[in-house]
Amino acid sequence: HASNLSLEAPFSPPPRTAGHTLPLAARAMPPRSRAALLPLLLLAASIPPQTLAFSLHPSAPLRRSPASSLRPSSLPHPPPRAPLGLRMSRGVGGGDEPTKGSEEDLKQVLSEKNQALTPEEELAGEVTGGTRYVQASEVRRKEMKKAGTSYAELSKQQLSYPRLLIDRLVDAFDGAPVASFKPPQTKRRVVILGTGWGAHALVKAIDAQAYDVTVISPRNYFVFTPMLAGAATGTVELRSITESIRDANPKVNYLEATALEIKNTDKTVLCQSVVCDGASCSINEFEQEFDELVVTVGASVNTFGIEGVKEYCYFLKQAPDAAALREAIGNCFERANYPDMTDEERRRTLSFVVVGAGPTGVEFTGELRDFIERDVARFYPELLPFISIKLLEASDKVLMMFESTLQARAIEDLTTPRPTKPQGLADDYVQVLLSSAVNKVAESEMTLNDGTVIPYGVGVWAGGIGPMPLVLDLVGRVDEQQKIPEARGRLTVDRWLRVAGAPGVFALGDCSFLADTPLPATAQVASQQGYYLGRLFNKGYDFSEDVPVQESGSSGDVAKPFQFLNLGVLAYTGQGKALAQIEAGKSKFEQTGTIGWLAWRAVYLSKQVSGRNQLMVLFDWIKTYFFGRDLTRF
């Protein structure tokens, strides 16, 4: 959603020189003093969870594409495509799709169609996470000229880090969202597509008594995605990290449906839902009208067109993905325990391969190692010699958004044998393989670009995000969107998050692209954008103006452009160790080991979206510590 989305970009910023990790003032401080600043920064980050939106985890797994040697300008635009609604009714490839059946089957049909991309579209619309700058200066100049101001004048409105932090703290204590204007008799209809980080923040922030707010999404809950790795191994339960969208704001109307087509000129959204009458279910189609539409549908899992990934790999992007992966892990150990299996079959069955060494892949590897060394060692001790974990990364580094010292520490934490390692496990049963791009995935083996064949029992794809078909449809329908190739299948927005060429339509999160401003593909970006847009709605700004102006205010009362407050990144590496890279303006503070783990747990606990979730997550952690993970399979 930013002018660049690749912390693992094909072309990286110049390498840092020695001693460049911290500014001069911070480097001059004694080590103990620098360490003492960490709790203060964490405290500042924890006070306003609803406003700072400090989820330090990317909203989707990240990996360099096998085609990443191509520069963005050389990649083609996503090819023309039929409207998604038409493709849904015809079926992929022109075949007829079922319109009646069980509720589970029909929902699966809608889910698969809603995320169906051709290999060409995946490569052309590839979105990797990161901080790559793009040449969108011409777009910015036209925007500033239209707004009647200059780029320099608008930049003066950017707050310094201390002022921005204070501004967010003040916003945090505003209390319940209340509109600063008198609502008209006929409320404006605001439709929100999605229930992810951006949508959830907007639903929390907007005054639903001043607007007629409707949320449309196939899932009726928000999920704390950074903890899906823990949910996949049983460290926490899925219900502990989810919240019903109705609980987020009881005054918001919710429709459980899949958005198929945005008709921006008609101000309608074409949707399909599964309706059931007893045991008989069918697909129902309807249109939802809007005055303002907020598109926050996130991104799809990008397989980069690699053969076999969708068919044989597990993902970690949604709650059902974590549930399916947890079931698959348990199934591997039960299968390997059969007496008629050969040692070779056991070794393949208990080989776990994780593709992509971003935070999702690293954290899942750490959680899986904890599960094996504590819980599997108790219940399946005879299977320990056959277990192996391989973390594959196409680039030559892990955790590209971290400093090099933390990257090296991550590999050390993952691969160094622990003092408490159970007998039977090989010292090198966890391996991190860099510069190892996957070329093909088969049912029981992966082939790398160099021809190496790796057998596996469970393959986890944490390798990239791409555009959503719904977003590609809108991009193809709006002329202004097709003139910005850097967007790569995302909706280009201005600094007030308005979609270019589509009045009344906004976009935020992974499906948006803020031209000329580098933002990472993280949950904290989407969440901050959601709260920002909610505050603009509550203050009654007129979005039809070139620069939004408060309708009831003076001519000079204009909306401040969106400004991202970067607070840092965290990653769990296993056995009570984590990496913490806390950012305060231009300063960066690094912590590892136990201190990093305490920071990781403190932030993740404080950033749960409700007191209920905080208590349930805390209880899950305590339960796992004393009793281990639950291996029950239903």
Image (cartoon, rainbow, N blue to C red):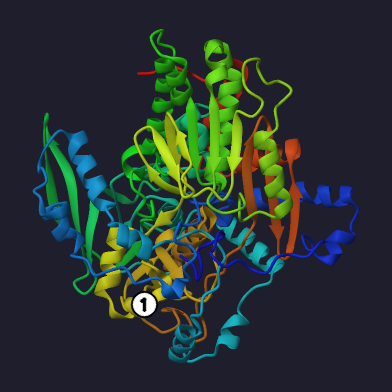
Left or right: 574 with respect to 71? Answer: right
- In terms of depth relative to the viewer, which is nearer, 218 or 330? 330
Query: For the residue carrying disc 1, how many other residues have a C-alpha within 10 Å: few (<14), some (14-19), or many (20+)?
Result: many
Name the residue rendered at 40%, 72% in the picture. Answer: 492
Name the residue rendered at 65%, 73% in the picture. Answer: 159
Name the residue rendered at 26%, 52% in the picture. Answer: 114
Left or right: 393 with respect to 35? Answer: left
Is disc 1 placed on a helix, strand or loop?
loop
Which residue extends farthest top? 339
- In terms of depth relative to the viewer, which is nearer, 275 or 439? 439
Q: Position of residue 583 (x, y in %)?
A: 69, 58
- In terms of depth relative to the viewer, which is nearer, 43 or 16? 16
Rendering quarter of residue 604:
top right
Q: Position of residue 380 (x, y in %)?
A: 52, 12
292 to 448, vertically: above or below: below
271 to 445, vertically: above or below: below
The quadrant of the rendering that contains the C terminus is top left
Name the residue rendered at 18%, 65% in the picture. Answer: 82
The residue under label 1 is 500
Q: Is residue 632 visible?
A: no
Rendering quarter of residue 169:
bottom right
The quadrant of the rendering that contains the N terminus is bottom left
Q: Where is residue 316 in the image (x, y as percent from the top left)?
A: 44, 41
Q: Position of residue 265 (x, y in %)?
A: 21, 75
Which residue extends farthest front? 451
- In terms of depth relative to the viewer, which is nearer, 439 or 44? 439
Please tell me how many numbered marks the rendered image carries.
1
Rendering quarter of residue 344:
top left
Q: Is residue 379 visible?
A: yes
Q: Mark 1: which amino acid?
A: Ala
425 to 38, vertically: above or below: above
